[in-house]
Image (tube, coloured by chain):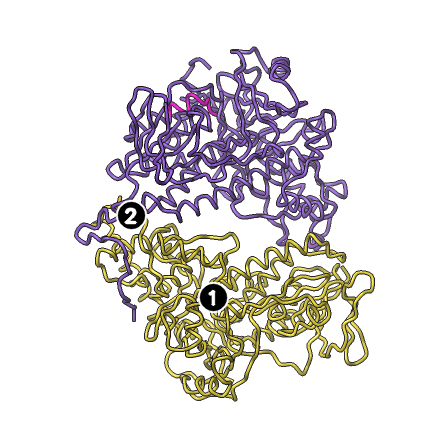
Amino acid sequence: MRGVAIVGGGTAGWMAAAILARRLGSGFGSIQVVESPEIGTIGVGEATIPPIRLFNDALGLDQSDFLRQTQGTLKLGIEFRNWARIGHEYFHPFGVHGTSAEQISLHQEWLKLRQMGEKHSFEDYSLNTVAARRGRVSGAGAGEAELWSVYSYAFHFDASLYAQYLRGYAQARGVSRIERKVVRVELRGEDGFIRALHLDDGTQIEADLFIDCSGFRGLLIEQALHTGYEDWTHWLPCDRAVAVPCESAGALTPFTRSTARTAGWQWRIPLQHRIGNGYVYCSRFISDDEAAATLLANLDGKAQAEPRFLRFTTGRRTKFWNKNCIALGLAGGFLEPLESTSIHLIQKGLTHLLNLFPDRNCAPVLLDEFNRLAINEYERIRDFIILHYKATAREDAPLWSYCRGMDIPEALDYKIRHFRASGRVVRYGSDLFAASNWIAVLMGQEIWPERYDTLMDQRDTGQLQASMRRMRRTIRQAAEAAPSHEEYLAAHCRTVPQ
Amino acid sequence: MPRTGPAPNWTRQISRRTGLDVHSDRIRSIAIVGGGAAGWLAAATLARLLKPAFCEVRLLDSGQQLPGPISESALPSFHRLNSLLGINEQDLMQRTSATFKLGAQFVDWSRPGESYFHSFGSLAAKLEAVAFHHHWLRLHQAGLGGAFEDYSPATVAAKQGRFARPVADRQSVLSRYSYGYHFHAASLSVYLREYAQAHGVTRIERPIAEVRLRAEDGFVDALQLDDGSSVRADLYVDCTGGQNLPCQQPYRSPHIDWSHWLPCDRALALPCRGEGPLPPYSQSIARSSGWQWRVPLQHCSDSGYAYASRFTSDDQATALLLSDLPGVALAQPRLLRLSPGRPARFWDRNWLVLAGSALEPLESTGLHLVQTGIARLMTFFPVSRFSPNDLEEYNRLTIMEHERIRDFLILHYKATARGDSPFWTYCRNMSITDTLRAKIELFKDSGRLSVLEEEHFGDESWLSVLLGQSLTPSGYDPLADVLGIEEVTAALGFMRAKIRTAVDALPMHEQFIEQQCQANFMGAP
């Protein structure tokens, strides 16, 4: 391998550069990032899921420093408003419900008590949810009381700052940054591999492996290699977004909020210095102006910039890895950030790349395995997102009527059917989200099992009630004893005001 | 604010008073058909997990069993059963003439004269985030690094005939292995039967004369016994392996045949006197039309020959087996039938086939599949007497599980250089499943392993067999090169020495058994 060229200097490009710089030795040639000075990063507030911590750990980043540098905050889950119906809300927490990771049938026990008339919400059994609702957090993984093994967290941060942070990391480890525009991609005649990138100053960059992080347009994977794109807009019809940051007002919530609106949904991502907001919408059902007006009318504080518009087509490349080119981030595909999976998909792509790292021949068996893994993961996340749209009682707007009635992928339909019948969660090997996540969203969106697991009827009801009561109390007490989100940030990683 | 939404939309009758038995049409009785180790294992597990008042469990023991296997081998997953049932290992081993199993030795599979071990353990830790075996492959291609087996504490111990239980300290190389068991099959059945009966399982010792079906939906209505009485249950669990049942079997789903990939369809077995020290592993030796096993028990050695009837006759097979016994034969050989394949549906209406697939014993998966089948039945315990969803998901997972094991077994036959008999020529040239082919091709490129859903055998197992059967990759993970070769050579040399030193201090297997769990059973083999 005589070098890797990364096209695009956004979050994907610098994540790739950082981890490759960390893992590749000098024997692999240079790592170069070509970043067009004209194209800005899509620098919205970014929400993540817990595996981001593994990525940061693999780089050896210090959590407090990372949060300081990226205006980051902690995230315990997502609050969903108005999804199942207007006025309804639920929380999708990280971690698992209950007080130990082994309580795999907790929701069945809860369903049984529910059927007997008990009123406690299932959310009372989630430490993440109970803590998040009270603005309480823990920013440590291991080393705490055993109860906290059920807890998990991720981050909100400024994606542009994260990219900058990783750029500094990568450059300190020998990655070179070339601020030029790619004007032509030259393919090899014999096998169609990319040979070189021609830049606007007349120079060229040669490499054996090219990573396309150029965003939606897919400069290499699509414009040069014509890989093809699978369109999923019949399942996920939103095709635009408008984003704007605003001033914070009130305490920092340790969770993302997603509010369903007439023609899509609005995100709210709290950072240390401001709140990131956006409206993801379907252009068939609302104009850009109306969408922007809706967004601006629903902010916590004063808008800090003009609204910025984005266009996208939900779906994925037919191959993420084609010839000697791997597409990451938006160049690989687009899934709306409803479950904060964008950065995770970049991370996962990099993990597979490192596990299947090729020599200059890019053996087809490696590509096939990479694509098999990546496609399965993409599709399972897609299904999880579709669930939010499908499982709604809303009929107040054309988007929601469409989603209620649409056909869904067979793998998702099978899951929903099983959950309805017995409260059991079908698991696929490539599922990112665990049973606890599916249960939170399925029941959150008011898909109720018709029956609970009959084995629950073997249990003594009085004992079950007592143990569930103890569990609620333990969780509530633990949450109340934790520091507030503000306190945590102040103590560990408050950004120095500029 | 915590949300309190509306109550679930229950569609069935609800008893709010007691909360019990709201599922008025739930499963209340289970009949297990077949009384071997599989049947009693199922019975013991169900008895442990189902209260008699909640669900009655009965077992039909036909009383006129065809001869079963002499030994049953258990994978390390058997420890889960021990802890679930609260079985004392020492007691179990004493009463079943059992020995410890660190793995199996495969002799003459890739070519005559070569052998390898498939032992139970986990790979050594990654170095610089690159899987251990890539570092080994790198050294190996440079003529360094010793044998792959030298890095497996279980294999090193097995070769020396040593055994002790692994230690809990994760820093020690002796934490990096596991073990299974070799049991005397009939004694294991008795052991599990006594457990099951003590936990409320009723044993019915009569042959089945007829399986009566309900005309309207094809469900099994009752099992009619030879004395005219009948047994009715909501769910029937078939542990017969397809034998000992009346031959008309409309209630059994069609058999999907795998004998074109797994050609051994018969086996002969007999007990021999064990000679020499007790090995902590079984042997499987490739022969002209199949393979021969040797399974050590405390009081004898189970010796058998699994063969393909297309390539050899029963007489030839008998002669071959008798010509090569490890000790004096203690009985005449018994014939066992294998039917490599699976039922199209493991669970069909109210009939669940638990031990019917009869995958061959090459990788000792028999008891394991009964365990996982029962565990899965508990996971998908039917919410009603007919719950198509539970059954559908049970089948989906069970089929995947069997197909993954199938691929692992096929690998043993396919990856051979032998062409010394029509059987091996056939195996070497046969077409294989797409899933296995993709795995082999990926591995041959650069030593990468592809893990599919519901895979029981992990990376170390696949590596043992792939490398053991001489499928050496042409490359390895290029990222292994971030370490200097001297550094890797030193690190791996240190690892080998550490394993050797630790294993040298272990007791001999035979001595360990004598001290800890010598059989108090000396019954007929």
Dominant secondary structure of the residues highlighted in magenta in the image: helix
Amino acid carrying label 2: it is: Met
Neighbourhood count class around disc 1 (C-alpha, 10 Å): few under 14, some 14–19, many 20 upward: many
Amino acid carrying label 1: it is: Ile
Residue B452 position in % (x across, y down): 56, 48
B187, above or below B217, in the image: above
User: Which colour is chain B painted?
Assistant: purple
Q: Earlier in the sequence, mark 2 or mark 1?
A: 1
Protein chain holding label 1: A
Instruction: Report the residue that reaches farthest toward the front.
Output: B215
Observer-nearest of B348 and A328: B348
Return the residue at label 1: A385
Observer-nearest of A166 and A459: A459
Return the residue at label 2: A456
Quarter of the image where one finds residue B195? top left
Chain painted yellow: A
> What segment is highlighted magenta in the picture?
B183-191
